[in-house]
Image: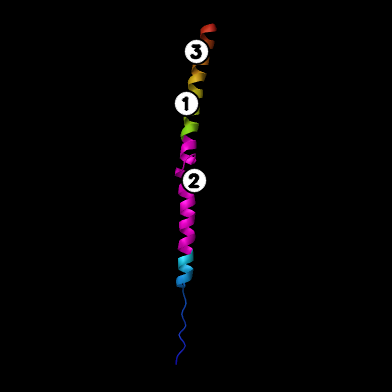
Amino acid sequence: MKKSETSGITLIALVVTIVVLLILAGVTITLVLGEGGILDMAKEVAKRTNDAKEQELKDFAEYLQKV
């Protein structure tokens, strides 16, 4: 009988790798799209920035009227 030498990835290693990648993908999707996630935070920050710009323009217009 000949002893066969195999090299490569075993099925168990492949399955473990896929499971780890699926867990990481699930965590990432939750962080990005979930309630209070990155997209929600970005929308909130954009709204605050626009509100601050509008307030600054109003304040500047009032200042110019006084001067």
What's the magenta region? 17-42
In the rendered image, the residue lying farthest to the front is 35
Labels 2, 1: front one: 2
Identify the amino acid type marked 3. Answer: Ala
The secondary structure type at the circle numbered 3 is helix
Mark 1 or 3: in front is 1
What residue is drawn where x is 47% and y is 40%?
35
Residue position for label 2: 31
Which residue is depicted at the point 47% across and 31% down? 46
Q: Is residue 40 magenta?
A: yes
The CA span between labels 2 and 1 is 25 Å
- Lower position in the chain sequence, tag 1 or tag 3: 1
Which label number is shown at residue 50?
1
Residue at image location 45% in from the left, 57% down from the top: 22
- In-front residue for pair 10/50: 10
Q: Quadrant of the C terminus?
A: top right
Q: CA distance from mark 3 to mark 2?
A: 41 Å
Residue at (47%, 83%) from the top-left corner? 5
